[in-house]
Amino acid sequence: MKTFSGKSTFFAIILALLLALPVAAQITPHSTLKNFKLPKYNENSYRAYTLSGREGIYDTEGFFEVNMVKLSLYSGDESQILETTITSPLAIFDLEKDLASGKSVVEITDKDFYLRGEDWSLDMNHKNIKIKDGGWIRFYDELDLDISGVF
């Protein structure tokens, strides 16, 4: 019978713990996360976005309800530039489809604009947001528009 030294046993325990980490890190239905950050990476292994919040509850239908949302959208390339930040008091996320929505206020800060509104939906893959109520936008740069034929 082979016996293991203290050093071998230590490494075997560390290996077992490391192999168990991915299973422990999965979000399961009815899970509640507190003060969390969940990064999402694209097919090229660059960060696409990071979702953070004060509390997140994952339900049985695959939706993730998040309180005090902060969603940081990145360039998705090697530069890893933070392009847009989205905040809201409450939102529902479909993390499989990269969709989000909420009835409460949403604020979107980008290098080119600031957008605010209520009753919104977001498609993170296409970087498209729809605001149904009270939406307004402030552009930081001057718009170069020819509206001479509009009026």
Image (cartoon, rainbow, N blue to C red):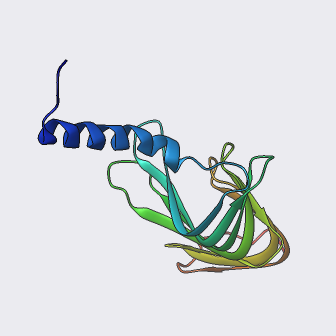
The relative height of residue 17 versus residue 138 in the rendered view (above or below) is: above
The relative height of residue 145 versus residue 114 in the rendered view (above or below) is: above
Q: Residue 55 in the image: state x and y as whole percent.
A: 64, 71
What residue is drawn where x is 67% and y is 69%? 146
Extreme residue toward the front, this view: 1
Q: Identify the image quadrant of the N terminus.
A: top left
- Camera-side residue: 58 or 124? 58
The relative height of residue 22 versus residue 104 in the rendered view (above or below) is: above
Relative placement, left or right, of 47 versus 57 is left
Residue 60 visible in the picture: yes
Q: Residue 145 in the image: state x and y as whole percent.
A: 65, 70
Q: Residue 148 in the image: state x and y as whole percent.
A: 74, 72
What residue is drawn where x is 43% and y is 65%? 82
Q: Identify the image quadrant of the C terminus.
A: bottom right
What residue is drawn where x is 75% and y is 47%? 62
Q: Quadrant of residue 6?
A: top left
Relative placement, left or right, of 74 versus 51 is left
What is the total number of numbered labels drawn onto the structure image?
Answer: 0
Relative placement, left or right, of 148 versus 68 is right
What residue is drawn where x is 40% and y is 46%? 46
